[in-house]
Amino acid sequence: MNSTGHFAPHCTMPSDLDESFCLRGPLPIISPDERPDFFMESKDAHDQYVAHRSINGVENTTTYHVVDGAGEIAGFISFKVAREDSKASTRIYNSVEYIYVMRKFRTRGLSKLLLEPLLRDVHVALRQATGVGRKLFVRIYSASHPESGGGNRVIRALEEGLWGLAQRYRRVELIGRHIQHVAKARQCFGKPPACGTTVCG
């Protein structure tokens, strides 16, 4: 595999991750000299990866992949993050469009690593929406429905990460499939709530 030349340092290394893995992205359109047999163990993953990195890929979708020490692609994620401002509030939308980890690389924490660029982009939007002098109410909408295997575990891990970001700020509400909460003046502490519960509301 030829390197794309795009690299992204990981923010917080998952505790169970082999440090020989690293993220690369955001990825450009697939070049003619890249191998054509991405993720051939799964036709759907191959088709999704190629589609998201094609010139006709889904608009406003970002793709990263993770590689091992030998440069082999171990998995990838395609996601969206968008922000919508109004006079009273800011809405931050995010979704995992597709995520996949090769079978031989599973159980190494790579799904959590692949979520980091999405969490980072949400955090950037959150900082902008809650900057000095801004008093808008912020809602983070997590609307992921990836069709890939392990989707529910991935979405729960994502929303726990979003919950951790949201509780750093005042007047931030997270609306997701597994977690919904409002953060008020840093009054939320401890572990994320169980599925379907609301805290600090």
Image (cartoon, rainbow, N blue to C red):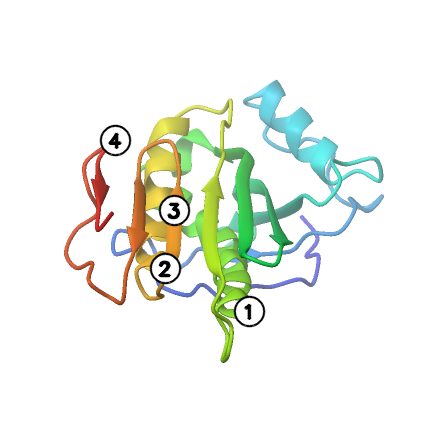
Q: Which of marks 1 and 3 is nearer the N terminus?
A: 1
- Depth check, front residue: 36 or 140: 140
The residue labelled by disc 2 is 165
The amino acid pointed to by label 3 is Leu
Label 4 packing within 10 angstroms: few (<14), some (14-19), many (20+): few
The residue labelled by disc 1 is 128
The label nearer to you, 4 versus 2, is: 4
Looking at the image, do the residues carrying marks 2 and 1 touch, with CB atoms under 8 Å apart?
A: no
Label 2 packing within 10 angstroms: few (<14), some (14-19), many (20+): some
Is 157 placed left or right of 99 in the picture?
Answer: left
Looking at the image, do the residues carrying marks 4 and 2 touch, with CB atoms under 8 Å apart?
A: no
Mark number displayed over residue 174: 3
The residue labelled by disc 4 is 196
The answer to whether 78 is drawn above or below residue 166 in the figure is above
Is 84 placed left or right of 35 in the picture?
Answer: left
Looking at the image, do the residues carrying marks 2 and 3 touch, with CB atoms under 8 Å apart?
A: no
Q: Which of marks 4 and 3 is nearer the N terminus?
A: 3
Instruction: Give percent across and percent down for residue 48.
Output: 65, 29
The amino acid pointed to by label 1 is Gln
Q: Which of marks 2 and 1 is nearer the N terminus?
A: 1
Q: What element carries label 3?
A: strand
Residue for point 43% across, 23% down:
149
